[in-house]
């Protein structure tokens, strides 16, 4: 515990942070309005909920395109390449090590912002769940103009994925508290600077994604 | 460094464009505040609606004669309007019959159709029904043009009877009375109009034997309605006559005839300015709401009436229940009447028990403009509620919409052996209203229609549906989404074949969802507690 130095690392660029919080806001708004439309509770009124949901959904869809563009242009997409190396270590850390004062087996660096478990989770979310939600959402929005499309299967997938996103959000929020302090990860996502223990050696493969361009 | 600069540049570029996109998206996605298309078109359609004429009927010499009978009046009309009677006699308003698709079956009150009110017109043998027939004497003789075209409600029958009685009497007092009677007739005959609501309403407001008995959206409150009751017929507003929408060609008045829809296609006047104006779309188009609003997406499945007529019978009550089993009770050997709420009869010896209601929430069904009806020759299942008249349509039918209805329920007699509804004769010296003998009334009534009667009858529960289409409320009174898009007590709870957000769910999705959410919560709670109690494994 003692004697370890804290390094401040600039991890998240301004655009990433802006994108993260915009997306967070939009997704939470979509959840609140979406589940009202689903009939789970009355809050802002069905029609308002529908309007806000449609507006936010389209906004998200449009702005996600900018994020995808940025990911491709900057090569940051490589941050999401899944790997099994150290994956088991990370799983073991959260299941056991974290209760026993062990260090996180993979520290964050600008070249590798996400640990193997995060990579897998975010890839699943960004490449699977979110696109599914966007496509079904768009179909839901347009189904009346598409002709012959039945709403039931669209609603089935859209609602199921929405529940899974809530599941992700809960775990995601909880995981932000697992930094060196309860709020260090959140602080990192606000300021861009994360405080990281200088303990583990960053291995070459972990930064491979970006080293070529430096 | 190269890479960092590249990232910096594209990061800021993307952020900038994204912010611009966010700012631009607002006005694009939000609805414009322009007037709704449906209102704009309707305003155009009713512009210059004032009718004008080149005929002053009071200056026509022929109409100043001393009329002695209704037929004479009609002959005078036909002198100029040569084809009018011929045209009218071809319409259902005269024949009370319309061919059915079923072999050998004629729909209509004078045909094989029955209802759960006075049941049947008994091939026009039931003279009590003829007060609503537009002739001077049933289907014998001439059309009574003044039923629909007379501005004045004049007691022609009584007057002609008086004139006949006074004929040949030289008493100057009587002569004066006769002269006054003639003058009265002449005034009524010269006071000509296009049919007004009160003309049509004389029968259509009072169908079933009294004000508001049948339809629920048609009663005498529409003679002079305010805008809250009906935006189209509002006396101080648009003041539509019935024919404003019930487009009339050669005395054929547009409207549904049993199985035949009121309009073959839904067309707006923009697509076809000679089309009938019987549909809402005619004047309001298929996308009547403000551009980009969700309501416009509803018009392919939901009839305008479903949202824009939140309740019917909003001023006068309408009859909801008629129980023939109770008919025939006498007090001191005499028929009697009991009145209840709304001052409306709840019991009549001649008819049975009634229930009335006001501000009724409609029932909703898929409806393609056509009805299925059980006639006197159709077999029924007396164990079931017999749907004497019920809308046709399904979610897969492109012409079908979810439409509001009044469902009139009741108990009416049927033939136990032949399993058919029966048509008791009601009025006249041998009718039920005089004899209170249902068996005899059925025997005589079925004879008028040439339908055999076994001699054994009982009563069966029946329903009769009326499409609700009048009493369109102002736009701000139309239904909120939540009236239908809700889990509990949705107005469309009975509508199947579609997925409705807010009303419907997949049990499996909600179950998996609940497990996923509760599972996550439980997981992070346990994990968090674990960290708390182990103090992250750190030693103080």
Image: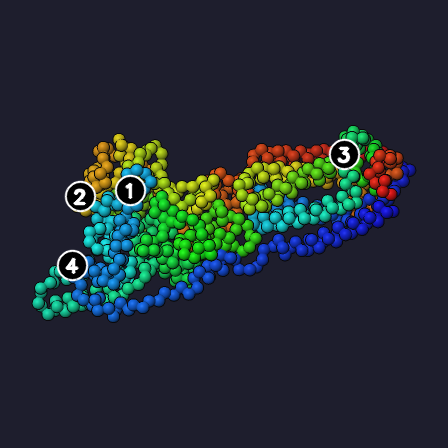
Give the percent coordinates (x, y) of residue B405. Answer: 40, 46
**Which label sits in the foreground, 4 or 2?**
4
Determine whether label 4 and label 3 are within 8 Å by CB.
no
Dot 4: what SS? helix
The chain identifier of the residue carrying mark 3 reads A
**Which label sits in the foreground, 1 or 4?**
1
CA gap between label 2 and label 1 equals 25 Å
Q: As drawn, is B136 to the left or to the right of A124?
A: left
**Marks 1 and 4 belong to one chain:** yes
User: Few, some or many C-alpha atoms within 10 Å of disc 3 (few <14, some 14-19, many ≥20)?
Assistant: some
CA gap between label 4 and label 2 equals 25 Å
Dot 2: what SS? loop
Residue B430 numbered tag: 2
Which residue is at the front of the view, B44 or B188?
A: B44
**Marks 4 and 2 belong to one chain:** yes
Which residue is at the front of the view, B404 or B346?
A: B404
The chain identifier of the residue carrying mark 4 reads B
Res B459 visible: no
Residue B161 numbered tag: 4
Residue pictured at 13% horizontal, 60% vertical: B164
Residue A147 numbered tag: none
The chain identifier of the residue carrying mark 2 reads B
Q: Which residue is label 1 attached to?
A: B106
CA gap between label 2 and label 3 equals 93 Å
Q: Which residue is label 3 attached to?
A: A82
Dot 3: what SS? loop
**Which label sits in the foreground, 2 or 3?**
3
CA gap between label 3 and label 1 equals 75 Å
Give the percent coordinates (x, y) of residue B138. Answer: 21, 51
**Marks 2 and 1 belong to one chain:** yes
Which residue is at the front of the view, A47 or B100?
A: B100
Q: Quadrant of the C terminus of chain B?
A: top right
């Amino acid at each position: 515990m003692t004697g370890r130095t804290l390094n401040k690392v600039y991890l998240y660029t301004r655009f990433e942070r802006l994108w993260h919080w915009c997306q967070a806001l939009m997704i939470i708004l979509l959840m609140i309005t979406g589940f009202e439309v689903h009939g789970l509770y009355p809050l802002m009124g069905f029609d308002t909920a529908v309007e806000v949901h449609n507006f936010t959904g389209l906004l998200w869809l449009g702005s996600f395109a900018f994020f995808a563009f940025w990911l491709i242009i900057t090569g940051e997409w490589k941050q999401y390449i899944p790997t099994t190396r150290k994956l088991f270590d990370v799983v073991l850390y959260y299941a056991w090590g974290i209760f026993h004062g062990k260090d996180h087996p993979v520290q964050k660096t600008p070249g590798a912002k996400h640990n193997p478990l995060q990579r897998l989770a975010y890839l699943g979310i960004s490449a699977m769940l979110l696109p599914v939600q966007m496509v079904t959402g768009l179909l839901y929005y347009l189904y009346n103009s598409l002709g012959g499309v039945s709403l039931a299967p669209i609603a089935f997938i859209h609602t199921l994925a929405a529940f899974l996103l809530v599941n992700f959000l809960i775990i995601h929020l909880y995981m932000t508290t697992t930094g060196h302090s309860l709020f260090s990860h959140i602080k990192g996502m606000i300021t861009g600077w994360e405080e990281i223990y200088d303990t583990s050696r960053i291995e070459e493969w972990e930064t491979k994604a970006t080293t070529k361009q430096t | 460094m190269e890479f960092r600069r590249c990232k910096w540049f594209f990061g800021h570029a993307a952020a900038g464009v994204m912010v611009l996109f966010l700012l631009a998206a607002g006005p694009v996605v939000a609805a414009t505040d322009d007037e709704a298309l449906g209102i704009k078109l309707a305003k155009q359609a009713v512009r210059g609606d004032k009718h004008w004429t080149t005929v002053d009927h009071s200056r026509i010499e022929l109409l100043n004669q001393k009329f002695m009978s209704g037929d004479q009046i009609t002959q005078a009309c036909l002198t100029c309007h040569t084809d009018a009677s011929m045209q009218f006699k071809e319409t259902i308003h005269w024949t009370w019959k319309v061919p059915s698709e079923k072999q050998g079956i004629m729909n209509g009150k004078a045909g094989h159709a029955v209802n759960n009110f006075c049941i049947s017109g008994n091939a026009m043998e039931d003279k009590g029904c003829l007060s609503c027939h537009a002739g001077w004497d049933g289907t014998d003789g001439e059309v009574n043009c003044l039923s629909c075209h007379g501005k004045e409600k004049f007691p022609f029958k009584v007057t002609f009877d008086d004139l006949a009685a006074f004929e040949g009497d030289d008493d100057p007092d009587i002569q004066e009375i006769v002269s006054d009677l003639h003058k009265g007739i002449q005034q009524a005959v010269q006071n000509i109009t296009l049919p007004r609501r009160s003309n049509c309403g004389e029968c259509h407001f009072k169908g079933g034997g009294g004000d508001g008995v049948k339809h629920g959206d048609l009663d005498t409150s529409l003679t002079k309605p305010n805008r809250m009751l009906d935006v189209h017929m509002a006396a101080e507003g648009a003041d539509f006559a019935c024919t404003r929408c019930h487009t009339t060609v050669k005395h054929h008045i547009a409207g549904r005839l049993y199985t035949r829809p009121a309009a073959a296609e839904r067309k707006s006047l923009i697509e076809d300015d000679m089309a009938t104006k019987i549909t809402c779309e005619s004047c309001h188009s298929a996308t009547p709401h403000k551009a980009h609003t969700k309501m416009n997406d509803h018009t392919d499945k939901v009839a305008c009436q479903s949202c824009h007529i939140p309740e019917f019978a909003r001023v006068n009550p309408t009859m909801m229940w008629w129980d023939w089993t109770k008919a025939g009770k006498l007090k001191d050997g005499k028929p009697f009447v009991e009145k209840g709420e709304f001052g409306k009869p709840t019991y009549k010896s001649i008819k049975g028990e009634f229930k009335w209601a006001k501000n009724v929430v409609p029932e909703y069904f898929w409806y393609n403009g056509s009805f299925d009806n059980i006639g006197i020759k159709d077999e029924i299942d007396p164990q079931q509620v017999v749907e004497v008249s019920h809308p046709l349509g399904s979610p897969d039918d492109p012409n079908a919409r979810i439409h509001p209805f009044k469902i009139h329920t009741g108990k009416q007699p049927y033939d136990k052996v032949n399993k058919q509804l029966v048509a008791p004769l009601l009025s006249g010296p041998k009718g039920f209203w005089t004899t209170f003998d249902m068996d005899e009334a059925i025997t005589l009534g079925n004879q008028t229609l040439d339908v055999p009667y076994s001699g054994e009858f009982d009563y069966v529960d029946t329903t009769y549906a009326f499409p609700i289409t009048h009493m369109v409320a102002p736009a701000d009174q139309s239904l909120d989404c939540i009236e239908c898009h809700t889990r509990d007590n949705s107005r469309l709870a009975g509508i199947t074949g579609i997925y409705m957000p807010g009303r419907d769910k997949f049990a499996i999705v909600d179950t998996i969802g609940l497990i996923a959410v509760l599972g996550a919560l439980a997981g992070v709670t346990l994990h968090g507690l674990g960290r708390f109690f182990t103090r992250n494994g750190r030693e103080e």
